[in-house]
Image (tube, rainbow, N blue to C red):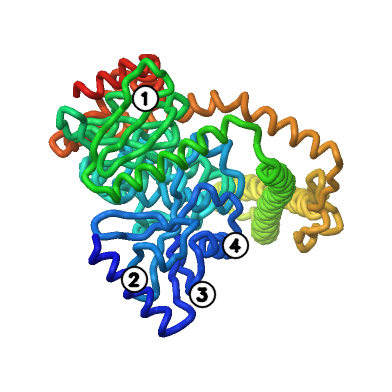
Amino acid sequence: MASALAAKMGFNSLLRKQAKNFSVRICTMESDMEFNCEVKLKGKELFDLVCRALGLRETWFFGLQYNVKDTVAWLKMEKRVLDQEIPKEEPITFQFLAKFYPENAEEELVQDITQHLFFLQVKKKILDEEIHCPPEASVLLASYAVHAKYGDYDPGIHKPGFLAEEELLPKRVINLYQMTPEMWEERITACYAQHRGRTRDEAEMEYLKIAQDLDMYGVNYFLIRNKKGTDLLLGVDALGLHIYDLDNKLTPKCSFPWNEIRNISYSDKEFTIKPLDKKANVFKFNSSRLRVNKLILQLCIGNHDLFMRRRRVDSLEVQQMKAQAREEHARKQVERQRLQREKQMREEAERARNELERRLMHLQDEAQMANDALLRSEQTADLLAEKAQIAEEEAKLLAEKAAEAETEMQRIKVTAIRGQEERRLIEQKMIQAEMLALQMAEESERRAKEAEHLKQDLQEARESERRAKHKLLEIMSKDVYVPPGLPAERMPDLNYSRENLSFEFKDTDMKRLSMEIEKEKVEYMEKSKHLQEQLNELKTEIESLKLKERETPLDIIHNQNAEQGTSKHSNFKKLTLQSAKTRVAYFEEL
């Protein structure tokens, strides 16, 4: 102890001799910052510098953490930075982290930056398995993390494989199931698609609302020993103190809410907690190191102060912050509604445009078909006209042949003055000539009828041609359909002016928005029920692919608690129903 103090004093004196300033690196969950600080700078001044750089006003949740040997410590606000047991190398590195967690994130976290920092820290703890998270909740939380990063799901942009490089699930969950990365992505994307319409801040808040119900959320664990020498775990969180078995960080054996604790103190390695119930025994335990007792005391005091602060009227600063947050939320809601309306108008205009293009293509197809029919009619008419002309020529030729036969018959009659034999021959020839003339007359009549029929077909073909032309003219002269709400003068080029998508917002919009905000509390229970149903559905989908032999002890404990209907809050209420005296006695007997 003395050597460490001497080394620290030597390091600090060396810094003072060499320069009046020293450099500090602050690591946040998103980026790093560096400051050049004066030697006399106090912890509170450095902390305020960081908060101003981040634009953070809800400072009471956060602190500057650094590593000391095999444990962590938080920078003390009232002491100089260089007078504390900080790392000796420059730049001096601190982690800017949430030191205390809210009971209800939605009610307590006012600023967007506060919510965002909590979201990043809780997500990292879940992925690093510092907070145990069941598989179905891990998938749902991953979908909200994806929404916070990528915005609304768009199948045209977010195609299969877009999450291949993302770290979204704890390795324990991935190893617990016989599922490929593509199968995990498919389930995460299915949940992600259901979050459409939420902003990044809303997605992060939904993430925190689910995470805050996890058993290990916001709990700091310390190894302790009771009077009997039994090794146990002490859990410190926003609700109080909890005692756990070494192998079960999920279900406490007993709990002490902050409103039942009167005094907390320590002497060397022994920690003493005095319950508000004077009949109850003093609650004592031992820790491994004095430094751990200091850390436990810091967390107890800070969590107790915040516990009591939540149950008092908000300070003027907090009231102003909440009022500003409500105004900003209302403004964002109005802006989002306006954007949604404009988007809806654009989508409707696009649909109308597509419908018009489809109708135009249909009319063009009809016109093309009519042109083709007209062309075929013209070709048929020409063919029929040619056939009719040929039939007429054939009829004329047959008529000439019939006339020649008649002339020949008359000549035979005139010269039939020869002998009877010649007469008989002539008569036979006459009979044959008459038969031939009759056949030729019949053929001529048939050809004439055929020519008449072809003329009728030609007339019908010309009539069909006339009707086809008439139909084409009707199609070309049809009025173009203009959907309601679209300007007719813009139809030729199918463009839409942005001026048609503007709106006027009145005071009634703000009143309606206020009413919607009031309804949120009523809708909370329904959302919680929906959330539980969603988690159960996810669990059912992947349960058949689970490898039971890979379950960790915490997985088994969580499943047992789920089967018994035991949750974080119900167990806390059950334990605190016992008297403080009973709980202290139970702790001492463990």
Residue 567 numbered mark, or none:
1
Q: Quadrant location of the N terminus?
A: bottom left
The disc placed on residue 38 is 3
Horizontal placement of 47 versus 499: left or right? left
Of the image marks 3 and 2, the number of the one nearer the N terminus: 2
Q: Earlier in the sequence, mark 2 or mark 1?
A: 2
User: In the structure shown, which secondary structural element does the residue marked by tag 4 occupy?
Assistant: helix
Q: CA distance from mark 4 to mark 3?
A: 17 Å
Q: Is residue 478 visible?
A: no
Q: Is residue 468 above or below residue 4?
A: above
The residue tagged 4 is 52
Q: Secondary structure at mark 2?
A: helix
Name the element at disc 3.
strand
Query: Residue beneath label 2, please?
Result: 9
**Could you tell me if the residues under marks 4 and 2 are in contact, i.e. CB atoms within 8 Å?**
no
Q: Nearer the viewer, residue 351 or 491?
A: 351
- Which numbered mark, 2 or 1, is in the foreground of this view? 2
From the viewer's perspective, is 238 left or right of 468?
left
Residue 402 position in % (x across, y down): 67, 55
- Mark 3 Cα-neighbour bin, 10 Å: few <14, some 14–19, many ≥20: some
Question: Could you tell me how far apart the alpha carbons at marks 4 and 2 are, in whole angstroms?
Answer: 30 Å
Of the numbered discs 4 and 2, the one sitting upstream in the chain is 2
Asked if labels 4 and 1 touch by Cβ distance under 8 angstroms, the answer is: no
The answer to whether the residue labelled 2 contacts the one labelled 1, judged by CB atoms less than 8 Å apart, is no
Query: Considering only order in the chain, which callout, 4 or 1, is on the residue closer to the N terminus?
Result: 4
Point out residue 400 in the picture as x, y percentages from the top left corner.
69, 60
10 Å crowding of disc 1: few (<14), some (14-19), many (20+): some
Q: CA distance from mark 3 to mark 2?
A: 17 Å
- Quadrant showing the C terminus: top left
Residue type at mark 3: give it.
Glu
For badge 2, the amino acid type reads: Met
